[in-house]
Amino acid sequence: MNIIDTHTHTSFSFDGENTPREMAEKAIELGVQALTFTDHIDVNDYYDSYYKESTLMPKAAKAIPPLKDEYENKIRIGFGGEIGQFMQNPPLAEKLIRDFNLDYVIGSTHSVKGYEDFYFLNFHKHDAMMFLRLYFAETLDMVKNADIDVIAHLTYPLRYITGNYNIEVDMGEFDDIIRDIFGAAAERGIGLEINTGGLRKPEYGKADPDSYYVKLFRESGGEIITIGSDAHRISDLAANFKKGAEIARSARFKQIAFFEKRKPVFVDLL
């Protein structure tokens, strides 16, 4: 199969472990044809010392683009970014996209306005359904208005709500707003990511999103699908890509994409 990993994090993310060079070498060893680095750009916390993004991303912008030429005969490398919480600071997000001259922009919502990342929330104390309502409303706003190429891990909160806290939620309540998200994405030419990171979490064990939502995206007119490992270390590069490809095929997608200079490049889903 063609292996195209469009969501990876390096040591230029606050939670990444390996250098871009180490990631590239491992990807070549695994037979990856195209690799996009998408280090965190959480615009709501960009100047917060915890995230240190204000020092990491400029370093990434100097270090990663030269690797494209160095490795051009071995692997296609893209320099992208995972813009977190875009709608919580749109002017900053748009400025950083321009300043870093990104090939690829994935839009993520890791936290809703006024709260910490879902990773840190205790859902024995918080109302999961309320947070999901806020999450999908912010995601819809992002898809309608933000300068992004792809929606990252659409069902991200479930990694923690159902994964860590074993709380079952009625996701049927959100079908209408998710259809609205997908309809807006299709209209603007925005793609959907199949994020395989959740498959590595034994307490969760699902892709984000799963096949139900990928099929719904297709039915809503979506045409661009990517597969991203969300790797933060070399051991997770391209992990569970066979399952990601199966999900794409189940929704009748015949190609997956990666991005160069903000334009999709399609590769047959073999």
Image (cartoon, helix red, strand yellow):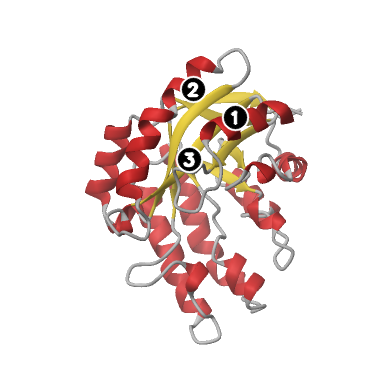
Helix, strand or loop at label 2? It is: helix
Quadrant for the N terminus in the image: top right
Residue 64: mark: none
Nearest to the observer: residue 155 or residue 72: 72
Label 1 Cα crowd, 10 Å radius (few <14 / some 14-19 / many 20+): many
Quadrant containing the C terminus is top right
Q: Nearer the viewer, mark 2 or mark 3?
A: 2
Which residue shows up at 72% across the image and 68% down it? 203
Residue ID for mark 1: 24
Residue 167 in the image: x percent, y percent?
A: 64, 79
Q: Is residue 221 visible to the viewer in this orientation of the structure?
A: no
| Disc 1 and disc 2 in contact, CB within 8 angstroms | yes
Could you tell me which residue is drawn at 33 percent across and 29 percent down?
Answer: 101
Identify the residue at image location x=71%, y=55%: 199
* Relative to 88, 183 lies left or right: right
x and y percent of residue 47 in the render? 27, 55
Task: Work out whether residue 121 can be spotted.
Answer: yes
Quickly name the residue at label 3. 38
Task: Please give the residue where the numbered disc 2 appears in the rendered image.
Answer: 67
Q: SS for tag 1?
A: helix
Say what amino acid the circle numbered 1 marks. Ala
Q: Amino acid at mark 2?
A: Leu
* Image marks 2 and 3: residues in contact by CB distance under 8 Å: no
Say if 25 sits above or below 90 in the image. above
- How many numbered circles does the render carry? 3
Near-viewer residue (93 or 24): 24
- Identified by mark 3, the residue type is Thr
The CA span between labels 1 and 2 is 9 Å
Asked whether the residues under the numbered discs 3 and 1 touch, taking CB atoms below 8 Å apart as contact, a structural biologist would say no
Question: In 3D space, how far apart are the residues under numbered discs 3 and 1 (Cα atoms)?
Answer: 13 Å
